[in-house]
Image (spheres, rainbow, N blue to C red):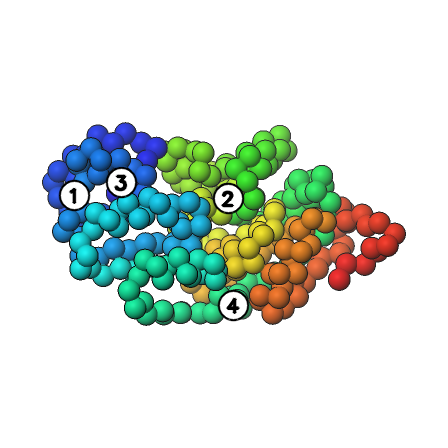
Amino acid sequence: MIVGGVSQKAQELELEQGMDILIATPGRLIDLMNQGFADLRHVQILVLDEADRMLDMGFIHDMRRIIAKLPAKRQTLFFSATMPPEITSLVNSLLKNPMKIEITPVSSTAERIQQALYFVDKPNKLPLLIDLLQDKSIESALVFTRTKHGADRLVRGLTKAAITAQAIHGDKSQNARQAALNNFKQGVTRLLVATDIAARGIDIEELSHVINYNLPNIPETYVHRIGRTGRAGLSGIAISFCEHEEIPYLKDIEKLIKQKIPVIEDHPYPMTLPEDRKTIK
């Protein structure tokens, strides 16, 4: 495994011994390639996991540099939970005569996942979350925020309310992210607060709740988020908060999944609406 955020010395030693499979993040791999520790001339298969996020988050230039060092004759596999149309053309430029295999449609949501929607004003999101967490049946939950700063801010607010929570995002070191994930899996931490890019690749067994503290602006991301629960035949619950500015995101999500998310109206922090918008459609 070749990743940044940790010392590269151990990785250098492993590379010198040779291996059958190398799993790497682009930045650290390029560093080691430039230093002469990684030689990709004999690679037979290239796998790009989380292809949509990898390309959408600015890794395309790094990937082109890596691909340029690979043999022309190879097999290339892209894996992704979602594939927005704007990424497809980029993918096609990197593949030759690709075969597309879809396991399930991008709009599908697991039947076992119970979805719920709370309309709430932005300042009341934290109080509403704290109120919901009084329910002891929510033993653990993966909470999604839109930004890294938002994740850190939410963790501080939850900690003040004596709710154990840790953040996991791109600004955290690899060791810090792994520690937070381990604490969550072991039940030391009740909530894991994550951004979408950090949550990719996380596989947590028996995760009962996913909470969208912020709705995603890409509807396919909603499907991916709530799919973190309800795995391996288990049931799951997906709770979403929606503020005024996120209503267009909600409409896009419901259009994609072809269903209305059930609205919970009986809660202590209902959204305040101007007189001309007393109903939300």
Which amino acid type is shown beneath numbered disc 1? Answer: Asp
Q: Name the residue under label 1.
A: 39
The C terminus lies in which quarter of the figure? Answer: bottom right
Mark 1 to mark 2: distance in Å? Answer: 33 Å
Depth check: 161 or 16 in front? 16
Q: Answer whether labels 3 and 4 touch (C-beta < 8 Å).
A: no
Q: Name the residue under label 3.
A: 29
Which amino acid type is shown beneath numbered disc 2? Answer: Thr
The extreme right residue here reads: 275
The reply, left or right, for residue 132 in relation to residue 74 is right
Q: Reading the chain from its start, which is encountered first: label 1 or label 2?
A: 1
Q: Answer whether labels 3 and 2 touch (C-beta < 8 Å).
A: no
Q: Where is residue 251 in the image (x, y as percent from the top left)?
A: 66, 61
Q: Which residue is drawn at 77% across and 49% down?
A: 270
Mark 3 to mark 4: distance in Å? Answer: 35 Å
Q: Reading the chain from its start, which is encountered first: label 3 or label 2?
A: 3
Q: Residues within 10 Å of mark 2 (few under 14, many from 20)?
A: many
Q: Which of marks 1 and 2 is in front?
A: 1
Q: Mark 2 points at which residue?
A: 195
Tell me if I can see residue 121 in this picture. yes
Q: Name the residue under label 4.
A: 108
